[in-house]
């Protein structure tokens, strides 16, 4: 579903001239193909323990330019990840509240991760602009599936506050679950092209999160439990893969693995 | 997937539970008085609720125990297995004073904030004592899990053949 973000307030970009220049590609040029790379990690990376999952991706075309605007990403996560005891997302944040007030309008116990991104305005400048703040919060479940809302607070080159909705779905084979996220198009100048996402890095897990609970009438802080690392590691590590769909219908994919943790050394008495 | 398992641990049932079980046993004995080889099946409507707390966990399994109330009163044990992000299986065992019942359920699992809910069906295929011949299929099976402490409520209802 295409979701326009709120009206973009632009910084002073020399948009028209640059945009025209960018569009003047040679007629004989081979079409660029989108490329993706993916990385993932567990912190800590120990079998069977609560962890913070970090993942990120980089997108570009074969000629090194920014890709078309991204419209969806499906992140496949390894089988055996344990959702049984996680206390992430003990509260939920309503999307409308997140959109209107940002994460400060959401309950602290709804936060599930954070990150940042790099976007590029397709004006041929070639320079990326960081979105320093991406927050992930738990949203209302959809069809019984866990929902993660990503809130991106962009200031430059476009001032836009965006909410991406990711749904955790069951997967198959080497993958136990997938995070399917629809990415709203990010407008640049009025009637101009949408912004391209180049880099995203984010986490899902308890690192740097503090939750609160009432104990004997007092509010006590605690660290939530994250999703559990599988208790057994596949031969080649924990597999992650991602599939990307762009505004022009093109696609890209990438895969990576989190290496198996070193075996725990038992002390012999 | 949630599995509710009733284990062989008996606990003291309340006086009301004992009376209820005794009444049920009496009715069963009456129904079965036609001879040693012919026991007439009797169907009761099960309407069972349980409140449980977490006793242990391992991997994808949660072991819970608590008290069952309703048609059959006694201790209840549940062994829950979260088989995927939205499915659970359960083995549920109830130990009234005059026997035991064990059922297996599968349910859709929904996590929404601090509470998760599950809803599905359960069958009963095993029993002992007065419930030695108990069987049921497609019982309604539902409940909640408090995600902060994994305290569970469970509700099972439907026709049970004895």
Image: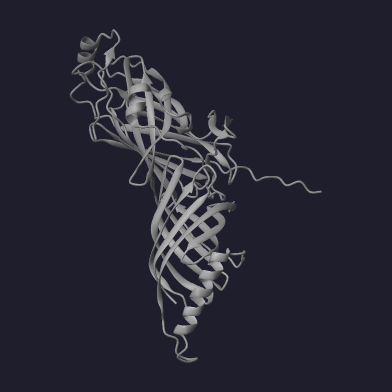
* B33 w.r.t. B68: above or below: below
**Which residue is depicted at the point 38% across and 58% down?**
B120
Q: Which residue is at the front of the view, A72 or B97? A: B97
Residue B103 locus on image (x, y percent):
47, 67
Residue A117 locus on image (x, y percent):
40, 24
Left/right of residue A130 with respect to residue B132 in the rendered view: left
Q: The C terminus of chain B is located in which quarter?
A: bottom left
**Which residue is depicted at the point 56% across and 73% down?**
B98
Total numbered badges shown on the rendered structure: 0
Q: Kindly indicate the quadrant of the structure image that contains residue A199.
A: top left
Residue B131 shows in this picture: no
Q: Which residue is at the front of the view, A205 or A68? A: A205
Residue A88 shows in this picture: yes
Q: Kindly indicate the quadrant of the structure image that contains residue A179.
A: top left
* B58 w.r.t. A44: above or below: below
Left/right of residue A151 with respect to residue B97 in the rendered view: left
Q: Kindly indicate the quadrant of the structure image that contains residue A73.
A: top left
**Which residue is depicted at the point 38% across and 27% down?**
A151
Residue A203 locus on image (x, y percent):
47, 32
Left/right of residue B138 with respect to residue A31 in the rendered view: right
* B128 w.r.t. B107: above or below: below
Q: Which residue is at the front of the view, B94 or A68? A: B94
**Which residue is depicted at the point 42% across and 85% down?**
B40
In the image as oriented, which residue stretches furthest toward the right? A269
Q: Which residue is at the front of the view, B49 or B78? A: B49
Residue B106 locus on image (x, y percent):
42, 60
């Amino acid at each position: 579903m295409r979701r326009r973000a709120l009206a973009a307030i632009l910084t002073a970009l020399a948009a028209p001239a640059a945009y025209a220049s960018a569009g003047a590609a040679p007629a004989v040029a081979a079409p660029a193909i989108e490329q993706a790379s993916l990385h993932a990690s567990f912190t800590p990376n120990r079998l069977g323990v609560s962890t913070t999952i970090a993942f990120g991706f980089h997108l570009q075309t074969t000629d090194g330019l920014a890709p078309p605007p991204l419209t969806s990403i499906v992140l496949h996560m390894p089988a055996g990840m344990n959702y049984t005891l996680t206390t992430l997302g003990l509260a939920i944040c309503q999307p409308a509240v997140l959109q209107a007030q940002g994460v400060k309008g959401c309950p602290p116990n709804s936060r599930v991760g954070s990150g940042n991104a790099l976007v590029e305005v397709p004006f041929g400048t070639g320079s990326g602009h960081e979105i320093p703040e991406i927050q992930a919060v738990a949203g209302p479940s959809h069809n019984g599936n866990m929902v993660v809302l990503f809130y991106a607070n962009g200031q430059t080159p476009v001032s836009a506050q965006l909410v991406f909705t990711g749904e955790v779905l069951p997967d198959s084979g080497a993958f136990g679950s997938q995070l399917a996220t629809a990415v709203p198009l990010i407008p640049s100048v009025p009637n101009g092209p949408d912004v391209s996402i180049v880099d995203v890095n984010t986490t899902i897990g308890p690192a740097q999160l503090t939750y609160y609970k009432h104990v004997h009438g007092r509010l006590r802080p605690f660290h939530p439990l994250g999703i559990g690392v599988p208790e057994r590691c596949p031969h080649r590590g924990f597999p992650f893969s991602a599939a990307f769909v762009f505004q022009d219908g093109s696609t890209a994919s990438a895969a990576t693995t989190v290496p198996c943790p070193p075996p725990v050394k038992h002390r012999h008495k | 997937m949630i599995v509710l398992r009733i284990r062989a641990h008996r606990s003291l049932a309340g006086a009301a539970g004992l009376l209820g079980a005794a009444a049920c046993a009496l009715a069963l004995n009456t129904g079965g008085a036609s001879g040693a080889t012919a026991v007439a099946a009797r169907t009761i409507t099960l309407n069972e609720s349980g409140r449980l707390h977490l006793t242990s966990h391992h991997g994808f399994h949660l072991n819970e125990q608590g008290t069952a109330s309703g048609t059959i009163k006694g201790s209840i044990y549940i062994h829950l297995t979260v088989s995927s992000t939205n499915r659970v299986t359960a083995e549920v065992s109830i130990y009234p004073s005059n026997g035991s019942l064990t059922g297996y359920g599968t349910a859709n699992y929904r996590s929404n904030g601090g509470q998760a809910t599950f809803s599905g069906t359960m069958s009963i295929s095993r029993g002992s004592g007065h419930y030695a011949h108990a069987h049921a299929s497609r019982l309604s099976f539902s409940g909640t899990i408090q995600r902060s402490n994994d305290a569970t409520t469970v509700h099972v209802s439907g026709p049970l053949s004895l």
